[in-house]
Amino acid sequence: MQHTLKSNVVFAGTGLHSGMPVRMVVKPASADYGIWFRRTDLDATDTMIAARWDTVVASRLCTLVENASGIRVSTIEHIMAALAGCGIHNALIEIDGPEVPILDGSARPFVAGLLAKGIRMQAVPVRAIRILKTIEVVDGDAVARLEPSDMLEIDFCIDFDDAAIGRQKKSLNMSNGAFVRELCDSRTFCRQADVDMMRANGLALGGNLENAVVFEGDQVLSPGGLRYADEPVRHKMLDALGDLALAGGPILGRYVGQRAGHALTNRLLRALFAQADAWEIVECGIPAGRKLPGMGVLHSDIPVHC
């Protein structure tokens, strides 16, 4: 069955790239509503933006959606991952700025807020997207691929020259709350050289050592070090779930990412939906729905080491 929130949940913080303070309210929505953003700080006629693969526009270092009137919201990947990982299919996200707050750099604060308010079942089956044949996109040495599977699986590999990151690989079956237990508290990461370059270009103005893991060579500069030895690849999986959530419904398939990022995952969704014989819509009632991310997740599943 589809799910929404029981009541509103409020988040406040600053944008990672803009550095601007922002207040965001996630509200319950009716069945089949999907996920939408609404800019409350603008007087424009059309301030609604669908959180969907075909509203994504090119952006550096984050996922950005835009409506036909040019109204935008950026850095949506962590809240989208939290909604998908908690099994929430319908919500209206009201935001008074152009960028979702970064909070601690992970999806954990979003997950905690959503689960604290509670999730309400709706008497309508989930419409999932079943992958029927393999679809792959490539950009240099980066690869993103979707393969048939009866549940969502994510398999990711990263490879960095920095000794503190190196080569990391992880695979997860995303059913039964795996996202909340294994991935939600993994923070965004970057190298000190990347920070310097981004700030020189007017980006990462709200970033600091408390909301991102910063590496330099073999050192972790952020206080307290890593939450997991493989926190970077876990965060890439978190990002992938958030970007896949823009498909418009849960995916039943195996996602494989090798050095993939936001743009490549969106290219993958566009390639998928361009081939009508590569996917189908299936209805998931209560038994089948148990394979979907977020089904049966509890507040106690949130990692406690943070």
Image: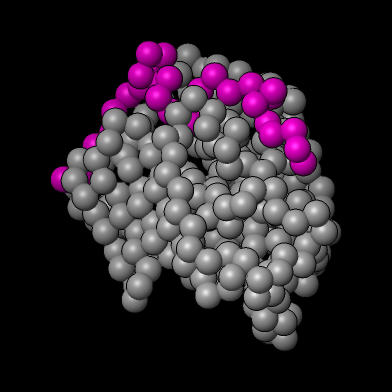
Tell me if 263 is positioned left or right of 283 in this view. Answer: right
Residue 227, horizontal then vertical, whole percent: 69, 48
Count of numbered labels shown in the rendering: 0
Residue at position x 30%, y 49% in the image = 146
Residue 224, horizontal then vertical, whole percent: 80, 54
The image quadrant that residue 61 belongs to is bottom right
Determine if the magenta segment contains residue 157. no
Residue 66, horizontal then vertical, whole percent: 54, 61
20 or 259, nearer to the observer? 259
Residue at position x 69%, y 24% in the image = 299
70 or 141, nearer to the observer? 141
161 or 92, nearer to the observer? 161
Determine if the magenta segment contains residue 280. yes
Can residue 47 be seen here? The reply is no
The colour mode here is one colour
Q: Quadrant of the N terminus?
A: top left
Residue at position x 45%, y 29% in the image = 175
Tell me if 243 is positioned left or right of 223 in this view. Answer: left
Residue at the bottom extreme, as displayed? 200
Residue at the left extreme, as displayed? 277
Residue at position x 55%, y 60% in the image = 63
Q: Compared to 287, does 116 lie above or below?
A: below
Q: Quadrant of the C terminus?
A: top right
The image quadrant that residue 214 belongs to is bottom right
Tell me if 270 is positioned left or right of 6 in this view. Answer: left
Can residue 112 be seen here? The reply is yes
185 or 295, nearer to the observer? 185
Residue 248, horizontal then vertical, whole percent: 42, 42
Residue range of the region highlighted in magenta in the rendering: 277-306
Q: Compared to 305, does 6 lie above or below?
A: above
Q: Compared to 255, does 66 lie above or below?
A: below
